[in-house]
Image (cartoon, helix red, strand yellow):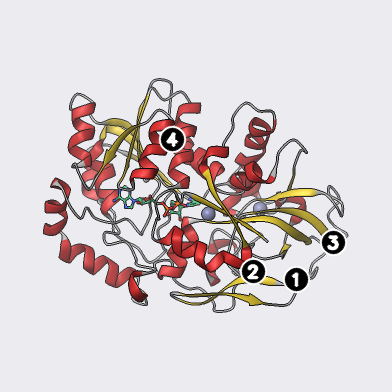
Amino acid sequence: MKAVVFHGVGDIRLDTVADPRIEQPTDAVVRLTSSAICGTDLHMVRGTLGGMEPGTILGHEGVGVIEDIGPSVRNLRRGDRVLIPSTISCGYCSYCRAGYTAQCDTANPNGPQAGTAFFGGPKSTGPFNGLQAQYARTPLAHASLIRLPDALDDDRAILLSDIFPTGYFGAQLAEVRLGDTVAVFGAGPVGQFAIASAKLMGAGRVIAIDRVESRLDMARRQGAETVNFDHEDPVEIVMELTGGIGVDRVIDAVGVDAVRASSGPAANDAEKQKSQFDEELGEIAPGRDPAHGEWRPGSGPSQVLQWAVRAVAKAGTVSVIGVYPPNDRFFPIGNAMNRNLVVKMGNCNHRAITPRLVELVGNGSFDPLSVLTQREPITNAIEAYKAFDTREPGWIKVKLEP
Ligand SMILES: NC(=O)c1ccc[n+]([C@@H]2O[C@H](COP(=O)([O-])OP(=O)(O)OC[C@H]3O[C@@H](n4cnc5c(N)ncnc54)[C@H](O)[C@@H]3O)[C@@H](O)[C@H]2O)c1
Ligand SMILES: [Zn+2]
Ligand SMILES: [Zn+2]
């Protein structure tokens, strides 16, 4: 079969590899009809989320049809059309039962303390071969896979594999309540769903911060007020827009590849912190290797965290869903502590959150389709990765068709 394979930092290829087979009685093999590229994949290719094993198939978003199934999976059958949530969970450990399915004790072969198990990730997350492929083995299929209603087409379903649940999780962690003012840093696909979810939870105002105009346009179409951090200082503008108080909640939908402002008033501040940011990057991603301007890591790993703790009101909540690697230790703790902030973070508990979103989209109460801007055959995967990596105008969410 064809699959997108990680060979090294800055080196991904569309390879021909062996088809997966059932290995455990709880496995299913799914023939993928849709996959997608996520910002998390970019961290791995850029080298800011390290520990990838060469040969791992990338991708953790998928929709498909069950091709083969182990005898212990009693709730699904060959031929069922399913959604594959990004993270893998067992459904029976104490964490799964409490809804922390991204911290399942069973799924990660590295043991219960190893943390989240997900498709197409670093060694410490499994590793499991990913979903940017024609077929995939999905472990613990009874508790991981979700059967899809016929009414939910692939274009909508693929958005439910990871990014809509993650945006929703971000708004949940942020404790968004009726009337709140919420700032969302990052207007990529995850940020778009954080905006939508904050609104679903009753936010009165949402302020979206990014520097990619086509992404800010999409945020504005959702009703957000927008700030381009290459033109204005985002903290100053947030303060101005909130009567000097700050926002009630902040969601970081950027993660470790945050960039510092390259022009405008925020660039002066960034220049003063240049050596600190460079030091952070050196420590977090020693193996980075930006070839010809591609796969370039963010220039300010802690930039969004710094802005977040300054833009939120005293005693407000900061929610971090942007991904930071385990070796990252740069968080502005003093500012957060002295302003009595609540800080919540983590990997999305997909299996706990997704079923109700499948319901919401399946019955037409909410339509996520506008976030999907690109549909590419898997044979164009590497080119599609490059366009998403460099944030070409209009490239927001990329679906791959295997
Ligand atoms: N926690 C989870 O379970 C989970 C799941 C999926 C994705 N993620 C993470 O969510 C993040 C976003 O994913 P995505 O697919 O939207 O990625 P993306 O790379 O497409 O989007 C990131 C956006 O952040 C913007 N940005 C960069 N620096 C910024 C700054 N200083 N201030 C404001 N915006 C800035 C970029 O211009 C870009 O539009 C990634 O870190 C990804 O790994 C987390
Ligand atoms: Zn993802
Ligand atoms: Zn579990």
> Quick one: SS at disc 4?
helix
Q: Which residue is mark 4?
A: 195
Residue at 36% across / 76% down in the picture? 291
Alpha-carbon distance for marks 1 and 4? 37 Å
Q: Is residue 61 left or right of residue 171?
A: right
Q: Which residue is mark 1?
A: 20
Answer yes or no: disc 2 within 8 Å of ligand 2. no
Image depth: mark 3 or mark 2 in front: 2
Where is residue 309 drawn, in percent x and y? 26, 42
x then y, percent, for residue 160: 61, 44
* Quadrant holding the N terminus: bottom right
Q: Quadrant of residue 328?
A: bottom left
Q: Tag 1 or tag 3, which sits nearer the N-term?
A: 1
The amino acid at mark 4 is Ile
Question: Based on the displayed image, in which of its 4 quarters is residue 6 positioned?
Answer: bottom right
- Closest to the camera, between mark 4 and mark 3, is 4
Spatial separation of the CA atoms under disc 3 and disc 1: 13 Å
User: Which residue is depicted at the point 46% across and 36% down?
Assistant: 171
- Tag 1, which secondary structure? loop
The span from disc 3 to disc 2 (Cα, nearest Å) is 18 Å
Label 2: few (<14), some (14–19) or many (≥20) C-alpha neighbours in 10 Å: many
Q: CA distance from mark 2 to mark 4?
A: 31 Å
Q: Position of residue 254 (x, y in %)?
A: 38, 51
Secondary structure found at label 3: loop
Label of residue 70 in the image: 3
Name which residue type carries label 2. Answer: Asn
Give the position of the C terminus as an image quadrant: bottom right
Give the distance between the C-alpha atoms of the residues marked 4 and 3, in whole angstroms.
Answer: 39 Å
